[in-house]
Image (cartoon, rainbow, N blue to C red):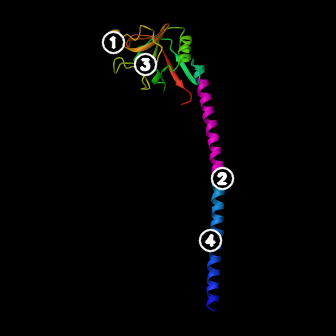
Amino acid sequence: MLMYILNTELTKKTDQLLTKIVNLTEARDQLVNKSMQLTKERDGLLSSNRDLIRDQLHQEKNELLKNGWIYYQSNLYFVSSEKKSWTESRRYCMERGVDLIIINNRGEQDFVKKISANANVWIGLTDIDVEGSWKWVDGSTLTSGFWDPREPNGHRGENCALTYLPGWADYPCSDLFLWICEKSILK
């Protein structure tokens, strides 16, 4: 009789455990299905978001191109037709949500010469904070550049950089030159 009672209790416990296993398996399967559904939904939203961003960038790019901006390697450039000081030039760019150009490589330097028709133009480079320590307008330090061999010479408070035919030169920030604004369309 004792064996029968123990066996019955064991069977009950086994049935309860099996029921729990079945319930947990069903719950796990529901969670797996929900996870797959959410993953699919997330992927769809990411795709829609990418498409929306691409379309907005395309629209913004086309609008800027209509307004005289020039496209080159994922960036848009605006070359001024009037002359301003370096500070006024930068302010002009910043009021439009952009900044003076940062020249990253030889290709971009050559592009700048081309679009500026070899005119002297302000670029986003200055050593106004610490003489001889050239920084770009984004705060990064100049590591290499395209200076004219005689530049920078730091004469008479020359703390702002511009491009001209032989290379870059430092000039007084108050001098008036054309300038180039740069906008990355990837940001």
Magenta segment, which residues?
37-63
* Residue toward you, 116 or 125: 125
Q: Can you say whether 64 is above or below 9 in the image?
A: above
Q: Which secondary structure lies at badge 3?
A: strand
Q: Residue at x 62, y 42 (%)?
A: 46
Q: CA distance from mark 4 to mark 1?
A: 82 Å
Q: Quadrant of residue 12?
A: bottom right
Residue that carries the numbered disc 3 in the rendered image? 125
Crowd class of label 3 (few under 14; some 14 to 19; many from 20; radius 10 Å): many
Which of pointers 4 and 2 lies earlier in the amino acid sequence?
A: 4
Q: Which mark is residue 157?
A: 1
Which of pointers 3 and 2 lies earlier in the amino acid sequence?
A: 2
Please state the horizontal and vertical placement of residue 84, each as a whole percent of the image.
43, 13
Which of pointers 1 and 2 lies earlier in the amino acid sequence?
A: 2
Number of marks drawn: 4
Circle 4 or circle 1, nearest the eye: 4
Q: Is residue 99 magenta?
A: no
Q: Which mark is residue 20?
A: 4
Please state the horizontal and vertical placement of residue 112, each as a whole percent of the image.
53, 14
Q: Locate residue 79 relative to residue 135 in the image: left or right.
A: right
Crowd class of label 1 (few under 14; some 14 to 19; many from 20; radius 10 Å): some
Crowd class of label 4 (few under 14; some 14 to 19; many from 20; radius 10 Å): few
Please state the horizontal and vertical placement of residue 126, each as a whole percent of the image.
40, 18
* Residue toward you, 76 or 88: 76
Q: Residue at x 65, y 73 (%)?
A: 18
Q: Quadrant of residue 158?
A: top left
Which of pointers 1 and 3 lies earlier in the amino acid sequence?
A: 3
* Residue toward you, 169 or 40: 169
Q: Locate residue 32 relative to residue 174 in the image: left or right.
A: right
Q: CA distance from mark 1 to mark 3?
A: 14 Å
Q: CA distance from mark 1 to mark 2?
A: 64 Å
